Image (cartoon, rainbow, N blue to C red):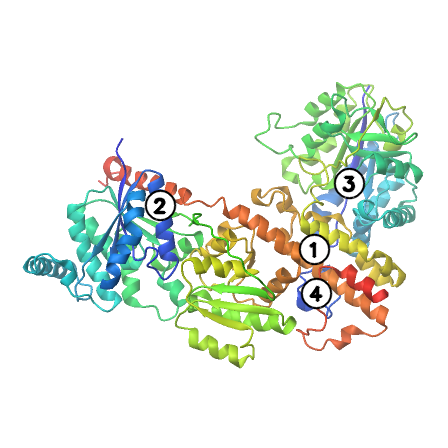
Amino acid sequence: MPNICFYFQVHQPYRMKRYSVFNIGHNSDYFDDAKNREVMQKVAKKCYLPTNQVMLDLINTYKNSDRQFKIAYSITGVALEQFEKYAPEVLESFKKLAATGCVEFLSETYYHSLSYLYSKDEFKAQVMLHREKIKELFNQEPVVFRNTELIFNNEIAHFIEQMGFKGMLAEGADHILNWRSPNYVYRAKTTTTLRLLLKNYKLSDDVAFRFSQQSWKEFPLTSEKYAHWINQHAEHSINLFMDYETFGEHQWEDTGIFNFLRNLPNELFKNHHTKFIWPSELTKIEPVAELDIHNFISWADIERDLSAWVGNNMQNSASSELYAIEKVLKELNNKALLEDWRKLTTSDHFYYMCTKYFNDGDVHKYFNPYDTPYESYINFMNILNDIILRMKTLIQGKNIVIELKDKYDVKHRITERPAKLINELRT
Amino acid sequence: MHKLKVLMFGWEFPPFMSGGLGTACYGLTKGLTNKNVEVTFVMPNGPEDMKAEFVKLLIASNLYKYNLKVKKIDTLLKPYLSDAQYKEEYDNYMKLLEKRGGDSSKILYGKNIHDEVYRLSLAARMIAETEDFDIIHCHDWMTFPAGIEAKKVSGKPLVVQVHATEYDRTGGNSINDYVYGIERSGMEFADRVIAVSYFTKEKIMEHYGIPADKIVVVHNAVEFSDEKKFDIKKHEKVVLFLGRLTLQKGPDYFVEAAKRVLDYDPDVKFIIAGTGDMEARLVDRVAQLGIGNKVLFAGFVNGHDVDKAYQAADLYVMPSVSEPFGITPLEALRNNVPVIISKQSGVSEVLKHALKVDFWDIDELANKIISVLNYRSLHHELSKHGSMEVHTFSWNIPAQKCIDMYNTVLHEKYHGIKAT
């Protein structure tokens, strides 16, 4: 009697402009509006609008039957903002989906950040901001949480439970499951009521990554074949968690992905016991076992740990300096500065600095708008230095920007330890 | 098992060299010898008093060690001639040699490159008749006439390797017709052309009309013997330029970027190591910009001083306008110095852990220099990954590519497609 839990992640970062040291103090417009608009409209056309339409059609087909088509989304705050700015029709279509009553929204950090790792205060603030946005746009109050890139461990489970959530998603990584199956509801060692819902990565990635790979043993994947695999199961739930861009962006329309999706519920329903289920419904099920997940896991790369965003000197330096100025920055009470700083917390920026597989030209490189991880670091740190200058202006009460007359003015040299500079200024 | 024998013509060979050509020839021949290929390396004459040294230095131990035979050649005082005139000159030369009892050191040498090229080609005929080899391999235009003669005499296939073209050297302005003519006839007469990068391959196709399937790309590598460590104390940050002071290498862009950087951060020293035709102009410009105390001209650097220069630097910059390959960034990384290289270079095709700029983009070059000098994590990561990457560059790889190509050419010749 398989239950199927579909969850889709929707995210777009604010992409940065090329920002050289000579821009510091002269230009505080860090984000590339034109590029962000271009990307948003492209993805809207290829993915968001057509896929939302398919979902809406499927929902409406089964809405009044005893087995509805149900799905869940987590949409980041920065993606929602960009819908508002660049593609309002996409926001409208998500609102329509919400209005059907068959769509559940999850909670996450507004800026899709790694803030849990660096600042619990900021993490909490970003989660609250996100909740407000979801309530405002879709009138829902999520009970299930997913952290950025499914980063998870015992500690964060406890923290989330304390915040009042009923469930949390994580990657069903082999090294935490061992012989166990991801198709059951679990509980983390450090929690009592929070339910742990694990992604079935094999079945999820069959669609998200392998769908159009001609070298794959199972190619071509028809809805019939896939439904047949799923229908063999009888555990708590098959958790199919994927990036929404799978539909139309990663897997292009001509691979047949939309037809696959369109036919899937019908094929699945051929088993009379099969049902679609929301994450929140899974939280009502008793966990079968306790799991001890001490080290962080995630859904990124083969390692499924933090190494995509944390670990090399550039990533460590960028993250620690960014969060080291948090306290003073918030004291300055400047909305624009705070928003700019928060946009820098988005995990994508650190992903681009990863040198792990740079030689092999893999997934990281495909998504990287920079030629090399080094360029992304230079860009990030230059922007951070401009933020410092703005903070200095606010702290010292004079407008430092106006003082810099010449493009190559030497007064305000860049530093890799901006936090130190700011803290010295404050004392 | 028949050992592959290559008759190779070069112009430079360490330590008697003025640039990357010698380094590349040395590395390649060493790689070939590692792969059990027998190389006879033919060089033109050097000044008489250097002859002995040269022989002792390179040959004695190394020759024996690498199973390499190096021949020095006599030359005559005549410009490059046509085929028939060649034969006549050659016969005269032989007569002259007999008359003087065969003592080559008594023959006069010419004073300019045209003569050298010509002399080498004459000698090539003689060598081609007496030496045993399977294939001829020439490095750059000065040796192409020699290769052509050797092919004519022996009937063996010819491979010409292009390390630089007249277009690279001049930036496309005032091409020397004599040189261009030789480059082109060499490539046309050869059975294969080796380019040191795709960048160069494209140039060859565009400017010399050679078809794509005749050109094989074999990227250069870098030598790893004798890594000496020097103890250097640094106070200011040092940015290094090391190369010929000529248009192709972009030293003028280095100077302009230096000015930008110094306006932003005066605690940086720029070292220019090398000599060349642009030297006076550069010295003037530096003075004019008022940065004379920050931009230092170190002159020509050779041997161990090269490694010393790299080790004293925080950053190495190669701002070449047109660089067919560019071994120096690899040498810098060998010394753990991070590099910024021109995108208009062959090495940028293969080196991943480096910062790259368009040679003309002085602001971006300055941006990157300032960033590397100020962001220590960036410096650390570039240095760490760059030197790891460079350790994977071995001359055995290009040597193997040459061997595979030699075998293809030989196979075509003796078993292959016959034109009907």
Q: Which residue is mark 2?
A: B30
Location of the N terminus of chain A by quadrant is top right
Please indicate, yes or no, whether residue B236 appears anywhere in the rendered image.
yes
Determine whether label 2 and label 1 are within 8 Å by CB: no
Q: Position of residue B214 (x, y in %)?
A: 34, 47
Instruction: Residue under label 1, please give it.
Output: A38
Quickly name the residue at label 4: A414
**4 vs 1, front mark:** 4
Q: Quadrant of residue B410?
A: top left
User: Is the residue marked by circle 3 packed among few (<14), some (14-19), or many (20+) residues within 10 Å?
Assistant: some
Q: Residues within 10 Å of mark 1 (few under 14, many from 20)?
A: few
Number of residues whose C-alpha sits closer than 10 Å to that of mark 2, classed few (under 14), some (14–19) or many (20 or more): many
Q: Nearer the viewer, residue A143 or A397?
A: A397
Per the model, the C-alpha gap separating discs 2 and 4 is 46 Å
Say which residue label 3 marks: A9
* Mark 2 and mark 1: Cα distance apart in space: 53 Å
Specify few, some or many for label 4: CA neighbours under 10 Å numbering under 14, 14-19, or 20 or more: many
Specify the subunit that label 3 lies on: A
Dot in front, 2 or 3: 2
